[in-house]
Image (tube, grey):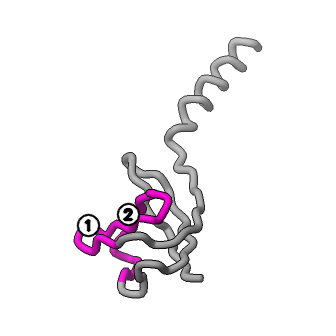
Amino acid sequence: MMRLLRFALVIVLLAVPAIALGAEIQGKVKAIDAGDRVVTLEDGTRISIPDGIALDALKEGAEITVSYEERDGKNEATSVQMK
């Protein structure tokens, strides 16, 4: 029985990194790189904006809330809301 529990624990621990965990951040836009589709917040956080999210509404100095997931070492936005 203990062997089965250990095996199940190992499987769960190996699967955890594969699950994308979402996060949310609020901040003021410091810079927008339209070519690379990256928004930098005043605290230095860089968020990649995928093609499905419009960049034209974002302006430097705007207060935003961004939901994002870490993918391939980058913060990729899943939604952007203006305040």
Q: Which mark is residue 8?
A: none
In the displayed structure, would residue 73 be above or below residue 43? above
Q: Quadrant of residue 56?
A: bottom left
Q: Which residue is mark 2?
A: 48
Q: Quadrant of residue 39?
A: bottom left
Looking at the image, which is closer to me, 71 or 56? 56
**Residue shown at 59% from the left, 62% from the top:** 24
**Residue shown at 50% from the left, 41% from the top:** 18
Q: Position of residue 53 (x, y in %)?
A: 41, 78
**Residue range corresponding to the magenta coloring:** 32-55
Q: Quadrant of residue 22?
A: bottom right
The answer for how far apart the CA atoms under marks 2 and 1 are is: 8 Å
Q: Residue furthest right?
A: 1
Please state which amino acid type lies under the numbered disc 1.
Asp
Q: Mark 2–mark 1 contact, CB under 8 Å?
A: yes
Q: Position of residue 36 (x, y in %)?
A: 26, 66
Q: Is residue 28 left or right of residue 10?
A: left
Q: Position of residue 14 (x, y in %)?
A: 54, 30
In the displayed structure, would residue 11 be above or below residue 76? above
Looking at the image, which is closer to me, 26 or 9? 26
- Residue 40 painted magenta: yes
| Mark 2 vs 1, N-terminal side | 1
Q: Crowding near pointer 2: few (<14 within 10 Å), some, many (20+)? A: many
Label 1 SS: loop
Where does the C terminus fall, quadrant-wise? bottom right
Q: Residue furthest left?
A: 35
Q: Which residue is mark 1?
A: 36
Label 2 SS: strand
**Residue shown at 44% from the left, 57% from the top:** 44
**Residue shown at 34% from the left, 66% from the top:** 38
